Image (cartoon, grey):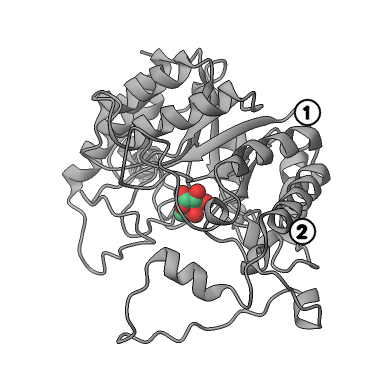
Amino acid sequence: MINRNLIASIILVVALTLSVYGQETPKKTLKEAYAGKFMIGTASDVKGLTEAELKSVKEQYDILTPENCMKPQPIHPWETFYYFGVTDSLVDWCQQNGVKVWGHTLGWHSQTAPWFFQAENPVNEETTSQPKRTRMNWDPNAPRLTMDEYWRRSIKGEMASREVALERLEKHIKTVVGRYKGRIIGWDVFNESIEDSGDCTTENLRTWSWYKVVGPDVLNLAFKWAHEADPAAQLYYNDYNIEQGAVANKGKHASSMVLLKRLLAEGVPITGVGIQGHWHLDTDLADVEKAIENYASLGLRVSITELDVTSTGDNSGAFGVRQGDKAIPKENYEKQAEVYKKLFEIFLRHKDVIDRVTFWGVSDTRSWRRGQDALLFDGQLKPKPAFKAVIDASSN
Ligand code: GLA
C-alpha cells in the first residue's frame, strides 16, 4: 500500500513538472535568461490582472509598457481633463515590485481625442470628467470610411490652426512626461507615422491627423518637448512593419530610413527605434535582421517593442480574429517556437544595440491577438513550446 502511494506521488510530481505541452518547464525566467543582454518586457495596464498574472509580471519581466492607459485618448480625453488614475497606480505598482516602466505613446494618429484638432473645445460638465463608456451603434449598411474620413468626421466645427494644435501637444507632452519624470525610463514619442503603402523613396508620412494639421515637423517638436520635460529619458520612434523591405531597401523600411535620417540631420534628440514586431509564422527574418543593422548604422538604439507571433498562420493586425471552435493544430505551436527561437538568435547577435524586447501581453488571453495564441504563455499562464525555445536560445 505504502509503495503504491509512493509511486502515485512520484507520478504526480513528475506530471506537475511537465507542462500541458509535454515539455519540462525550464527553471529560468525570461529576465534571468537574458540578464546582461537586453531587458525583457511585457505590456499591460496592470489594473485587472489576477494575482497569478501579477506574479508572472514580477518574475518574468524587467520592464512594463502600459498597453492602453497612457495613450493620448485615455490619459487626456478632454482639453481640460487628464485621467491619471490607472497610470499612477501602474507606475506605483511597478516601482514597488522592481519593474521598470516604458511610456507609450505621446503622439499618435489613433486613439487621440478629436479635441486636439478642434478650433474650439467647450468646457462643461462632460468635458471636465472621465468620459462615459458609450456603446457604438454599428450600422452594417453604412459606407465604409477610410481612417482619414473617420478622423475628419470626428472633428466638430472648425479645424484648429497649426499653432493652436502645437500648443496643445506641447502642454500634453510636458504634463505627461513631467509627471512621471525619473519614474518612466523612456518614451515612444511618436507612433506609426508612416503610411502602409506609397512612395518608399520619401518618408511617406500619413496625410491626416498631426501630419495634416501640423506637418512633418510635428515629430521634431514632440521629441524636443519630451527631451525638455525629462532630459534623462530615452526617446523612441515606434512603428509596425518597418522591417519590411529592409533587404531590398524598399517599402516601409526604406521610408523609415528616410525619416530617421532627416530627424538625425535636424538634430532631433532621438535615442532609438521601436520595431513593434507584430509577426507571424512566415515573417521574413532576413528583413528583421537587416532592419536592426540599418538602424544601428545610423547610431540609433533598437528595441522590439510589441512582440507577438501568431500561431494560426494569420497575419492580420487583428483585435483577436477569434478562432471560435477552430482548434490550432499542435504543430503550429512548434512552428511558432521555431520562429521565436530564430528571432531571439537574431536579437542576441545584435545585443550590443538592442535595449529591450517587449512582448505585447502577459498571456494568450491578455492579448489584442486573442484567438491567435501569439505569446509565450497560454491563457492559464502555462509556458508554451515558444517559452522553452526563447529560454533555450539564450544559452546558445
Ligand atoms: C499598436 C499600438 C499598440 C496597440 C496595438 C494593439 O501596435 O502601438 O499600443 O494598440 O497596436 O494592441
Task: Tell me the kind of residue under disc 2.
Answer: Phe
Q: Is residue 61 visible?
A: no
Residue 345 located left or right of residue 154: left
**How many numbered marks appear?**
2
Using the numbered discs, state the Cα–Cα distance from disc 2 to disc 1 in whole angstroms: 22 Å
Task: Tell me the kind of residue under disc 1.
Answer: Pro
Locate the C terminus by quadrant. Answer: top left
Up/down of 234 relative to 115, above or below: above
Q: Does the beta carbon of the residue at mark 1 sit less than 8 Å from ligand 1?
A: no
Give neighbour class at mark 2: few <14, some 14-19, many 20+ (Cα, 10 Å): some
> Circle 2 is placed at which residue position?
84
Please tell me in which quadrant of the rendered image residue 286 appears. top left
Residue located 26% across and 64% down the image: 323
Residue 241 located left or right of residue 56: left
Q: Earlier in the sequence, mark 2 or mark 1?
A: 2
Please tell me in which quadrant of the rendered image residue 45 appears. bottom right
Residue located 75% across and 48% down the image: 170
Residue 37 located left or right of residue 140: right
Up/down of 130 relative to 47, above or below: below
- Element class at badge 2: loop
- Element class at badge 1: loop
Please tell me in which quadrant of the rendered image residue 235 appears. top right
Up/down of 377 relative to 210, above or below: above
Q: Which mark is residue 231?
A: 1
Q: Is residue 188 visible?
A: yes
Foreground mark, 2 or 1? 1
Residue 153 spot, x, y in % from top left: 50, 75
Q: Does the beta carbon of the residue at mark 2 sit less than 8 Å from ligand 1?
A: no
Q: Nearer the viewer, residue 246 or 102?
A: 246
Q: Which mark is residue 23?
A: none
Up/down of 387 relative to 174, above or below: above
